[in-house]
Image (cartoon, coloured by chain):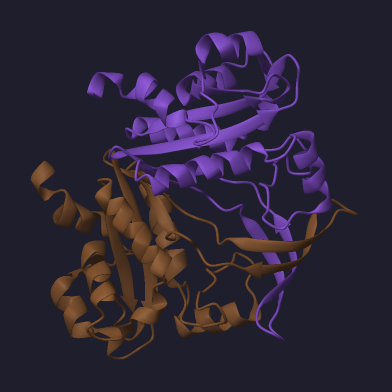
Chain colours: A purple, B brown
Amino acid sequence: MTTIKYPGGTVPAAKKTRTKAKLTIAAGNRGMDFENEINDTNAYYLERDIAVISKRPTPINIVKVDYTHGPKITQAYFEAQSTTDYNGIYKGRYLDFEAKSTHSKTSFPLSNIAPQQVRHLRNVIRHGGIAFFLIQIVAEEKVYLLDAEYICDFYENKPRKSIPFSVIKEKGHLVPFAYRPRHDYLAVVDEVFLKNEQ
Amino acid sequence: MTTIKYPGGTVPAAKKTRTKAKLTIAAGNRGMDFENEINDTNAYYLERDIAVISKRPTPINIVKVDYTHGPKITQAYFEAQSTTDYNGIYKGRYLDFEAKSTHSKTSFPLSNIAPQQVRHLRNVIRHGGIAFFLIQIVAEEKVYLLDAEYICDFYENKPRKSIPFSVIKEKGHLVPFAYRPRHDYLAVVDEVFLKNEQ
């Protein structure tokens, strides 16, 4: 969800309890960051009974727990998400997606995507699920939905190490931005995946 | 997944890195515990391309992170899962379930289920998903699948504080046990939820 890189190549999702690093990112994004905005969008969908979509918690590898005053984790490390950040159900369909934010001015680096995420999304598509990416271009304050099939193809063929914004705009679909829901990506899902079913 | 209770009323899922408490539980279960067995079953389903079902990581509330040598979490606490432990896609259908293990000799205590899990499963059912509980009766070495609708009704009406094993056996469906898959719960899902669709 962020653009910080650290050993292991993966990126921890935002935490409720903000750490120093987290605060810097939030400030860079001018307020609520992309992950919080998507969580807020999902909360809206749930309240309005439109869909049930939730964020998978960041996997943590726990090394030490102190049980003196109830369980307190004293040593642990972030782990790579083996799937994607979000999944759920919409109009009876299984839905699965990854949300990524980039501060680049020109293209979306494929290094933001882990191989196991591509494998997972391929599996989801093969089993009849709806799979996509939400890519936020921070500099332009725009979010695009891209069919996971397109991104997986691009990732596996790797014609470039990053997807130019021009390609994202051509192949992707602009997600409407509003006060609430913040990023109405299900409106785009209707258009892109469910048009023939309605 | 375990029967340890701690403040907040919820229960942390088993961790890869085994803590002292975890080892005790595992020993009580004679080897691989229920959660690991379900994870192994899901790995089998994935390998055979039968279904894509994954465990949601346990949510952790992170208080302190030390960035001196890469991010190391130094203070954190287990949080309640706001949904269920498992979800995914099977035969194009969204599937969502909670797995619980009880060491009781007579009944399954409803205190093992959190109100937000009941709400979540109700939402899933309303949106057309397949929702159920897997309940392991440790003393009998048996696992039963129960339609979430039945458990949610029982939970909300609360005729008792626990569901007697006799009721679980009457209303539930025995999950076949084998070497691999360990608990073939999708065979039961076929019978209970998908019989009319095939």
Measured as percent of width and height from the top left, residue A179 is found at 55, 34
Q: Give the vertical position of A188 relative to B61 (above or below).
A: above
Q: State the image quarter where residue B151 is shown.
A: bottom left
The answer to whether one can see residue B97 in this image is no
Q: Residue furthest left?
A: B196
Q: Is residue B88 left or right of residue A38?
A: left
Q: Is residue B64 left or right of residue A36?
A: right
Measured as percent of width and height from the top left, residue B27 is found at 51, 83
Q: Nearer the viewer, residue B169 or B140?
A: B169
Q: Give the vertical position of B17 relative to B65 (above or below).
A: below
Measured as percent of width and height from the top left, residue B155 is found at 29, 74
Q: Is residue A190 left or right of residue A69?
A: left
Q: Residue furthest right?
A: B68
Q: Residue at x 58, y 34 (%)?
A: A99
Measured as percent of width and height from the top left, residue B20 is found at 64, 81
Q: Nearer the viewer, residue A173 or B96?
A: A173
The answer to whether one can see residue B50 in this image is yes
Q: Residue at x 66, y 30 (%)?
A: A101
Q: Residue at x 36, y 61 (%)?
A: B119
Q: Residue at x 9, y 46 (%)?
A: B196
Q: State the image quarter where residue A106 is shown.
A: top right
Q: Residue furthest bottom?
A: B105
Q: Nearer the viewer, residue B3 or B180?
A: B3
Q: In which quadrant will I find the C terminus of chain A? A: top left
Count up the numbered dots: 0
Q: Nearer the viewer, residue B76 or A78?
A: B76
Q: In which quadrant will I find the N terminus of chain A? A: top right
